[in-house]
Amino acid sequence: ETGVTQSPTHLIKTRGQQVTLRCSSQSGHNTVSWYQQALGQGPQFIFQYYREEENGRGNFPPRFSGLQFPNYSSELNVNALELDDSALYLCASSLEASGRSYTGELFFGEGSRLTVL
Amino acid sequence: GDSVTQMEGPVTLSEEAFLTINCTYTATGYPSLFWYVQYPGEGLQLLLKATKADDKGSNKGFEATYRKETTSFHLEKGSVQVSDSAVYFCALVKAAQKLVFGQGTRLTINP
């Protein structure tokens, strides 16, 4: 069983640039969530995708956008990067079904560390 | 809004010591509660969970009891090992399907 993989692991961008982060979900999982973890802080929910549709969004501006593909892999795009976007971006996958109670058992990747200069 | 507050770290203990990491939450309704752990160089992993009041979650010698009257979910272990060194996150979830995490507590166990 393949776990959650993220790429790239590290990257450096300059203010105003755009970045795309990628995530392959664990085999059999249909839901992907993205979190931002600033240094010394807990992860903050960005958004979730379920069957290629956005299914919940946290308090992040529209320049944070995402996609989920038919194979359930996902991308996080951030436009017009700001210094405060420097963080570890975590992808988590889970198997969800409509109408179910949410168990909170997410399977996380190791993250993509973004530095904005 | 919903929030989770953990005891400030870092926490440093000797091997075989007793561990408590405090966690309290603020939420409407009936959230489920979790402890996640992040070992060095690895992704977050679910350590244990409890879905209703008075439930006790346990795993790898760690325990936490869902106390609705005190809105707490403190993590405990009777005898810690060097391999328990990690960052521990308390979290909650409701029907909104997003985890709300505390700020994390870094634990270091010395031999």
Image: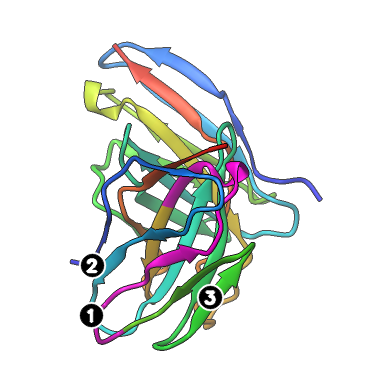
Mark 2 belongs to which subunit?
Answer: B
Classify B39 as above or below B63. Answer: above
Residue B49 visible: yes
- Disc 3 residue crowd, few under 14, some 14–19, many 20+, Cα 10 Å: many
> Does the residue at mark 1 contact the one at mark 3 (Cβ under 8 Å)?
no
Q: Earlier in the sequence, mark 2 or mark 3?
A: 2
Query: Callout 3, which amino acid?
Result: Gly
Q: Which residue is mark 2?
A: B2
The secondary element bearing badge 3 is classed as strand
Q: Residue at x 56, y 24 (%)?
A: A9
Classify B72 as above or below B61. Answer: below
Tell me which corner region of the image, top left, top right, bottom left or bottom right, holds residue A87. Answer: top left
Picture coordinates of residue B53, whole percent (x, y): 39, 88
Mark toward the viewer: 2 or 3: 3
Q: What segment is highlighted magenta in the picture? A: B68-88
Query: Callout 1, which amino acid?
Result: Thr
Q: Which residue is mark 3?
A: B57
- Disc 2 residue crowd, few under 14, some 14–19, many 20+, Cα 10 Å: few
Q: Give how far apart the Cα atoms at labels 2 and 3 are.
A: 21 Å
Picture coordinates of residue A12, whole percent (x, y): 41, 13
As drawn, the residue found furthest toward the right would be: A1
Identify the coloring. Answer: rainbow
Q: Give how far apart the Cα atoms at labels 2 and 1 are.
A: 7 Å
Q: Earlier in the sequence, mark 2 or mark 1?
A: 2
Q: Which residue is mark 1?
A: B28
Picture coordinates of residue B107, whole percent (x, y): 44, 43
Classify B94 as above or below A15. Answer: below
> Does the residue at mark 2 contact the one at mark 1 (Cβ under 8 Å)?
yes
